[in-house]
Image (spheres, rainbow, N blue to C red):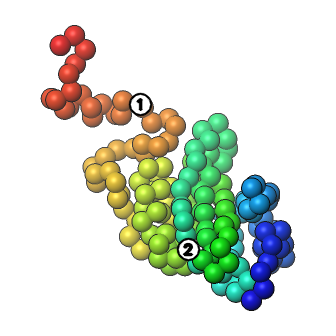
Amino acid sequence: MTDVTSNEIVDKVLAAFPGRVRSHKMFAGEPYLSIDKDGLRDVCLLLRDDPDLAFDYPVEVTAVDYPDDAERFEVIHVLWSITHRRRVVVKSRVSEGDCTVASVADIWKGANFMERETYDMYGIVFEGHPDLRRIMMTDDFEGWPLRKDFPIEGHGWREQFDFIPQVGD
């Protein structure tokens, strides 16, 4: 195994998937790749399986909400290579109308609960996930609490608790 540089990581992904990388940049010496959502699994398999890359640990799967953009959500995968001691960030954009992205839980088992949490908080559906259901909120909870259009006071559920003092009490 050779120790490839951050630029070489980007070059390997660009060479393997010429039409799938929307953009890329370096930040603090680490590569950030913006990937077409349809190519996410293929890119993740390359990042895991290429011995020069060996990204074998999913640090984080999360999302960011940009409510004014056509592709409202950015799904973010932060990956770490234990062998090479380096990180890569892979981002994919999804729209609210097609709020789905491929699951990587079968590629990295550690992504399972992180995908469930992202689903639970943002409503992003991870296609192919083995058990996509709420993990933090109750099953009867309505809505996605980390979306920026979610009401700060919820959907009226806080008024149901007797222990919260009402204004004027």
Residue 29 visible in the picture: yes
Which residue does the image show at 74% across and 89% down from the upper left? Answer: 1
Q: Secondary structure at mark 1?
A: loop
Foreground residue among 66 and 76:
76
**Amino acid type at mark 2:** Tyr
Residue reaching furthest to the top? 168
Which residue does the image show at 41% across and 31% down from the upper left? Answer: 152
Tell me residue 133's x, y (percent).
36, 62
User: Height in image: 2 above or below 68?
Assistant: below
In the picture of the structure, the residue carrying the numbered disc 1 is 152
Residue reaching furthest to the bottom? 1
Foreground residue among 100 and 137:
137
Location of residue 82 by image quarter: bottom right
Disc 2 from disc 1: Cα separation: 34 Å
**Amino acid type at mark 1:** Ile
Tell me residue 155's x, y (percent).
34, 34
In the picture of the structure, the residue carrying the numbered disc 2 is 57
Foreground residue among 3 and 7:
3
User: Height in image: 88 above or below 63?
Assistant: below
Q: Earlier in the sequence, mark 2 or mark 1?
A: 2
Which residue does the image show at 58% across and 44% down from the upper left? Answer: 65
Residue 38 visible in the picture: no
Q: Secondary structure at mark 2?
A: strand
Which quadrant holds the C terminus?
top left
User: Height in image: 164 above or below 132?
Assistant: above
